[in-house]
Amino acid sequence: MCGKYAKIAYGRTGPLDFVKIDEDPGAWHIGIQHEGQWISCLSVFFEGGRQAQFRKFGTLVAFQGQGFGSQLLSFMFESLKSKGIHTVYCSARAEKTEFYARFGMQKIGGPYEKNQKQYIRMELTF
């Protein structure tokens, strides 16, 4: 679900394999549907102990800025906290760090490049 959706949200074309990773089968994939269409989605990968990473987060462009992504992140954070997860992190695109900071996430380290885009690790500790 989230792999195909992430490809759409990021405007990628070509093979779906771009967004697939080996850990997908063990991940927790969550999303929001609107009128039967997936409009926002993310995948959570548990890293043993009390840490998790979320990846492949995106909202279809037509639905951005309407709070759907924020609702999904809030739900994920509360769910992870209730499951005993202590730390959750992501690789945020550099231009999106202010969005994640609104949820209390903090920048960890400096920017790095991946697939010709700048990213920064952001982390939230409960």
Image (cartoon, rainbow, N blue to C red):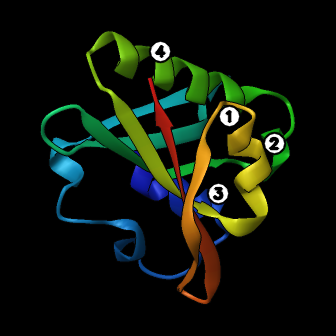
Q: Which residue is mark 4?
A: 78
Q: Earlier in the sequence, mark 4 or mark 2?
A: 2
Badge 1 crowding class, 10 Å Cα cut-off, few under 14, some 14 to 19, many 20 or more, is many
Given the image, on which type of amino acid does mark 3 rest? Ala
Badge 2 crowding class, 10 Å Cα cut-off, few under 14, some 14 to 19, many 20 or more, is some
Given the image, on which type of amino acid does mark 4 rest? Glu
Give the alpha-carbon distance from disc 4 to disc 2, as whole Å.
22 Å
Left/right placement of residue 44 relative to residue 2 reads left
Q: Which residue is mark 2?
A: 64
Q: Secondary structure at mark 4?
A: helix
Q: Position of residue 37 (x, y in %)?
A: 61, 34
Q: Which residue is mark 3?
A: 9
Left/right placement of residue 47 relative to residue 38 reads left
Count of numbered circles on the image: 4
Does residue 36 appear anywhere in the picture? no
Q: Position of residue 109 (x, y in %)?
A: 53, 67
Picture quarter with the C terminus: top left
Give the alpha-carbon distance from disc 3 to disc 2, as whole Å.
10 Å
Q: Earlier in the sequence, mark 1 or mark 4?
A: 1
Q: Position of residue 89 (x, y in %)?
A: 44, 46
Q: Which residue is mark 1?
A: 69
- Of badges 1 and 4, nearer the viewer stands 4
Give the alpha-carbon distance from disc 2 to disc 1, as whole Å.
7 Å
Left/right placement of residue 96 relative to residue 33 reads right
